[in-house]
Image (cartoon, rainbow, N blue to C red):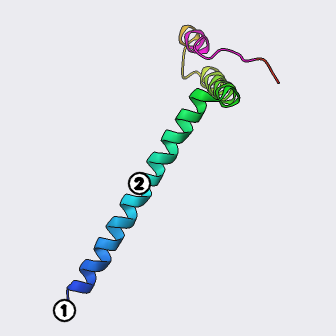
Amino acid sequence: MTPGMGLWCVMEDLLLAVLVGLMAIGLSLALWSAMVRVSPRCRALHAQWARAVLRRRYVAGQIGCGEFWHRMSQYPQYPQE
């Protein structure tokens, strides 16, 4: 075994750990997006969150009135449980 082999093994293990971590993040995002599309409760929570973000952006002056109402219409209000 040459002196540089230990460093190469560490680098290889580190790269593998980063790739596995990125795959785990991607999988969790995919599962979350599927859950939001399927579950009525998750869909309602997402719409509530999105509407709150739009209100904050409108109050802060980041978006105009027309864009605000256009985007708000894309997130229907679900009845409260």
Left or right: where 25 falls relative to 47: left
Q: Which residue was labeled with disc 2?
A: 22
Q: How far is mark 1 from mark 2, CA to CA?
A: 31 Å
Quarter of image, res 76: top right
Residue at horizontal 61%, vertical 22%? Answer: 54
Disc sitting over residue 73 in the figure = none
Residue 68, position as x, y percentages in the image: 58, 14
Quarter of image, res 7: bottom left
Residue 78, position as x, y percentages in the image: 73, 18
Q: Amino acid at mark 2?
A: Leu
Extreme-left residue of the structure: 2
Q: Which residue was labeled with disc 1?
A: 1
Extreme-front residue of the structure: 38
Q: Is residue 22 magenta?
A: no
Between 51 and 27, the one nearer to me in the picture: 27
User: Where 67 sits versus 55, above or below?
Assistant: above
Residue 70, position as x, y percentages in the image: 55, 9
Quarter holding the C terminus is top right
Residue at horizontal 24%, vertical 78%? Answer: 8
Residue 72, position as x, y percentages in the image: 61, 14
**CB atoms of marks 1 and 2 within 8 Å:** no
Q: Secondary structure at mark 2?
A: helix
Q: Amino acid at mark 1?
A: Met
Left or right: where 4 falls relative to 50: left
Quarter holding the N terminus is bottom left
- Span shown in magenta: 68-78
Residue at horizontal 44%, vertical 46%? Answer: 26
